[in-house]
Amino acid sequence: MSLAYKNYQTWSPSVRWFHWVNVLCIFSLIFVGFIMLYKKELGISGLDAKIGLKELHVIIGYIFVTNLLIRLVFAFIGPASARFSAFIPGKGFMKSLKDYRLSLKAGKPQQFIGHNPIGKLAVLALFTLFIILTFSGLFRAGTDIYYPPFGNAITSYLAEDGTDPSSLMPYQKEGINQEKMAALNAIRKPVGKIHLYTAYFLMFLIIIHIAAVVRAEVKDDERLVSSMISGKKVMSEKPQDE
């Protein structure tokens, strides 16, 4: 039975803060990343510029990682909307996914206080990509410009006997054991490709996510954007997860 429009409390402040900080970080990282990839075409040259761009990318990455770690902590100790159960498919998920898809085909999509079944899959995929980007990015930060948390271990490994590891400079050969550098590059380069192509896949999912949000706002009568700002959803039907 249809109901009058009603407000439902949905996303907690921790979820909303994570979302918008994450949005800013990701778009900033993508922007700086493309400058790094196409710096020659943009007329940017020189070692200082190369290192500066990498440092900027890494510093934004630290904010991204810190935000993600805080979000994962709240997935254990936060309110219901922040818990893993809010976006990890559980018992009965396949049936709920089938029912939701049928409701979409019928033109009367089921409404949810939290994520709909397709949204849960999307969020799970996004978090998986975030974690891959975190580990691959931190590793490259350590190998490329010797930044934490792996930088000290990398310089200690690369330094020639009798060379102070802290004296090593990014992208310079002085004081570096070249055999060890070659061995490190055998790992560093594949990790860099994983980081790059994971970022491309993330961009693809972001485009799909934005399209789905626009569709939900326009066609399905779901106020997803406003709910991620206010923490409340306005719905005209009884939500499936009430």
Image: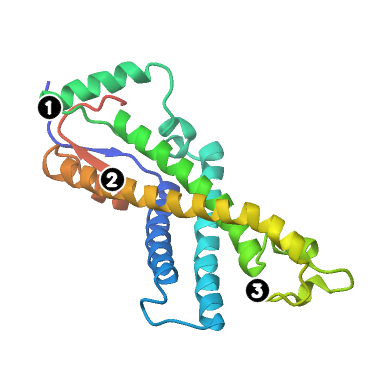
**Which mark's residue is nearer the viewer, 3 or 2?**
3
Which quadrant is the N terminus positioned in?
top left
How packed mark 3 is, by other alpha carbons closer than 10 Å (few <14, some 14-19, many 20 or more), is some
- Please tell me how crowded label 2 is: few (under 14), some (14-19), or many (20+) other residues with Cα within 10 Å: some
N-term-proximal mark, 1 vs 3: 1
Image position of 218 (left or right of 182): left
Vertical placement of residue 102 versus 220, above or below:
above
Q: Which one is closest to the eye, mark 1 or mark 2?
A: 2
Q: Residue at x 14, y 39 (%)?
A: 221
Q: Nearer the viewer, residue 56 or 190?
A: 190
Image x and y of residue 190, in percent: 56, 51
Q: Secondary structure at mark 2?
A: helix
Distance from label 1 to label 2 (Cα)? 20 Å
Q: Is residue 40 above or below residue 139?
A: below
- The residue tagged with tag 1: helix, strand or loop? loop
Q: Tell me what residue is drawn at x 54 percent, y 56 percent.
A: 192
* Residue 14 numbered mark, or none: none
Q: Residue at x 42, y 75 (%)?
A: 39
For marks 3 and 2, the one nearer the N-term is 3
Residue at numbered disc 1: 108
Check disc 3 and give the amino acid type: Pro
Q: Nearer the viewer, residue 79 or 28?
A: 28
Residue on which the image places disc 3: 170
Q: Which residue lies at the image location 57% right of the left edge and 56% below the top edge? A: 189
